[in-house]
Image: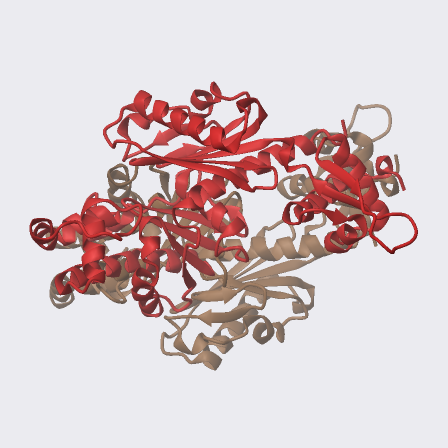
Chain colours: A red, B brown
Amino acid sequence: MTSSATAPLLRRLNAERALAVLREVGTIRLAELADASGLSRPTVDAVIEDLRRIGLIAETEDAPAGRRGRPARLVRLRAERGYVVGIDIGVHKCVVSVADLRGAVLATEVRQLGQELDRKARLDGVRRTVRAALKPAGVERSAVLAVCTATPGVVDPRTGVVLACDVLPDWKGLNLRTELGRSFGAPVLADNDANLAVVGERWRGVAAASQDVIYVLAGERLGAGIVSGGQVFRGHDGGAGEMAFLSLLEHTPGAEGIGALASHVGKEVVARLREHDAVRPGGAEGLTGDAALLMAAARDGDEEAQQVLEQILARIARAVGTLALLLNPELIVIGGGVAAAGEQIAEPIRRRLPQMTSLPPRLEVSSLGDRAVTVGALRTALDVVESSLLDNLNG
Amino acid sequence: MTSSATAPLLRRLNAERALAVLREVGTIRLAELADASGLSRPTVDAVIEDLRRIGLIAETEDAPAGRRGRPARLVRLRAERGYVVGIDIGVHKCVVSVADLRGAVLATEVRQLGQELDRKARLDGVRRTVRAALKPAGVERSAVLAVCTATPGVVDPRTGVVLACDVLPDWKGLNLRTELGRSFGAPVLADNDANLAVVGERWRGVAAASQDVIYVLAGERLGAGIVSGGQVFRGHDGGAGEMAFLSLLEHTPGAEGIGALASHVGKEVVARLREHDAVRPGGAEGLTGDAALLMAAARDGDEEAQQVLEQILARIARAVGTLALLLNPELIVIGGGVAAAGEQIAEPIRRRLPQMTSLPPRLEVSSLGDRAVTVGALRTALDVVESSLLDNLNG
C-alpha cells in the first residue's frame, strides 16, 4: 500500500501517532517505531516518507558489527527543523524559553519587570527578554516557527486581545498577537497564564495522566486553569478560571492572592517582622514582600506567622474546596509562587478537602514550579507548528 | 447515487439532519425537506428510504385540486413508532412525562412524595406515578423505547448509580438503572436533576441558542447544571454543579437552598408570619413552608419579609456571581421553585452581576418552570432511542 492510497485524515492521524513517539525517543529503528506506535510496518514506511517530505525526518543506517543482512534503517525527528518560543509576561517579571521541535528547552531567560511599567515599556522589556533568550540558544529569529505568550487576565484566544486585566490596567485592549507578531515572522498566540500552566502540567508535570484537572496559580494573584475531558475550559469569552469569588464571598475586595492576603490578614505580624527582622533568605520563589516574609518566618518557627499562614491557607483551602465541589476534578495542582513551599502549603489544604466535599480530588504541588506557564506556552506553540506542517502532508 | 454508495458515517449524519427537520414539522414534501435540511434531493430520497426501513417514516401522496403532473410525495415522522418516559424524582414529589418520538408530551403526572419515605417506598411512589402517566397517554409499557430519570445528588451516568445524595440519605448506592429497569423492557438512564434541566432549557426553554450556559436550580435545594461548548460538564465522577460552596464560604452549613436560607436568615420574620398570618395563596410553586410564606408576604408588601428576601437574593446573587466569574457562561438560567416568582427574583440578581464580574452573562428566568427537568429527561431518552434506531441503518 502506498501512502497516496490512504485517506487524508487517516494519513494525518498516522503521522501524528508516529510523531508522538519520535518526540520522546532519540534515534529509533523503523521496526521499533512500528512497535511503539502500533502502526504496521508498511504504514510506518509511508508515514516516514510523508514526514521526510516536510523536513521532519533525518535518516542514518545502522551497521552493527557481526550482523548480517541489510543494515537496519534508523530515523530521528529533525528537532533542529525549527524552534518555538514560550513567553510568560507577569506583573513583576518576564520568563522566555526557547525549545526545538522535540520540545527540548535550549535556553530560558528571566528578567525583572517593574510593576509600574506602562504598556510600551513592558512590551519593550518582553522583547529584550526574547532577544536575551534566543542568543544563548543559538537560534535565529527566522528559524522560530511559532510563539505563544501568557499574560494575566482574560484573553480571547481567537484574536489574542486582552479583554480584561485587573493587575495590569493599561493592558486591556492590547492585541498581543499583532503587537508581538511584528517581532517574528511566525504566528503568535496568546492565552491566560493559568490556562497555559495547566497545559504545561499535563505535558511535563504532575497532571500527565489527568483528563479532569484544575491548576491553581497561587502567588501574588490567584487564578485557575481548568481542563475537562482533556480540553481547556475557557468559558464564553475566554474568562473562565477567575478566582475573585473568594473576596466576593468573604467580603474582602481585592484580597485574592497570597500577597494581598498576607498584607490583609497578617497586617500586624508583617509589620513586626518588617521592623525586627531582616528579610530571611530562602523565601518562596516568585513571592515578594509580605507573603515571602511571612512564609519564611513561619518556616523558621515564628508562631504568630504560623497562625497567620494557617488562616491564609484555610482561605485558599476554601477556594480549592469551591473548585472541587463545583467542578469535581480528579486532580488539583497547586502552582505559582507558593509551589516552592511544597508540602508546607499542600498538606494543610489537602487535610481540609474531605470536610468540604464528598468527592475530594487528589491534590499535588506543581513539579514545574514557576516554569509551568512557559512549558505550556511551548507545548501550545509546538501544537501549532505540527498542525501547520502536517497541513502540507496532502498538498 | 444510491444510499448504499454513501459512507456509513455520512449516511447517519444525513439521517440525523433530516430527522431534526421532521421532528419540528408535521407532514412535509420531499422538496421542502431538501430545502429545510440543506440536503440534495437525491440524498433526501436515500435518507427517507433509510428512515422508512427502520419504521420512522409514514408517507402519503398529495393530490391538490387543479394541479397537473405527478402528485408530490409527502412524508412525516412516525411519532407513534414508540414512546419515551421522563421521570423527575424529588424530595417532595415525583413528576413523570410521557412523549412520542417527536417529543410531543402526551401526559404528565405529578404525585406528592413524603420527605420521610425510605428508598423502597419512594421507588414504589415513582412506579405508581409512571403507571398514572402512561394510562392517560394511552401508551403500553411495551411501546416505551427509553426512560430517563432525574434525581438529586451525584449520579454516575455510565452506571446509573447514585454516588452521593445529601437530601435523600438512603439513596446513596442505589442503582437507578437496574432498579427501574425491571419495570420496563427498555433502557433506563439516570442523571442529576440540574444536569437534565439544562438539557431541557437548551431544547425547549430560554437557552435554545446558547452553547455556554448554566442552569441554577434554586428551590428547597441549590444546584447547577453546566453546559460548555454544547456539552454537559459532569466532572470526573459526575459530581460537577454542586453548590454547597455557598455555606462553605459563608460559614452557614447546610443553608444552600431557598427554604433553608429562609429558615436561617428569616427566622424571626417567618415565626411572626406563621403566628399572625394564614398561608397566603399564590406562593411560588415548588417551594414549601418558610420560603413560600416569605415570598408571598414580600409580594404582598410586608417590609420585613422584603428585607429578608433581599438578603437571601443577595446571597443567591453571590453564588450566581461565583459561577459567572469562574465559568464565564454567556447565559445563566434561574430555575427551580423560585422561577415561578419571575422577575421578582431575577431582577435583584441581574442588577448585582456587573458589580461582581467584568464579563456579566445574560440572566433569564426558566420558561419551563418545574418541567425543565422532565423535558431534559425526555430529550435524553429521545437521543438514546434515535441513536439506537440509527445504529440499524447500516445493518
Kindly identify the residue that appears in the image at 49 percent across and 70 percent down.
B162
In the foreground, A346 or B243: A346
Kindly identify the residue that appears in the image at 64 percent across and 37 percent down.
A79
In the foreground, A387 or B168: A387
Indicate the quadrant containing the N terminus of chain A: top left, top right, bottom left or bottom right: top right
Examine the rendering and report whether any part of residue A171 can be seen.
yes
In the foreground, B359 or A41: A41
Kindly identify the residue that appears in the image at 29 percent across and 36 percent down.
A92
Kindly identify the residue that appears in the image at 86 percent across and 46 percent down.
A42
On screen, residue B316 versus residue B276, left or right, reads right
Q: Position of residue A331 (x, y in %)?
A: 45, 59
| Residue B174 higher or lower than B380, as above or below | below
In the foreground, B340 or A198: A198
| Residue B360 higher or lower than A209, as above or below | above
> How many discs appear?
0
| Residue B162 higher or lower than B106, as above or below | below
Q: Position of residue B373 (x, y in %)?
A: 47, 56
Indicate the quadrant containing the C terminus of chain A: top left, top right, bottom left or bottom right: top right
Q: Position of residue B308 (x, y in %)?
A: 16, 54
Q: Position of residue B160 (x, y in %)?
A: 56, 68
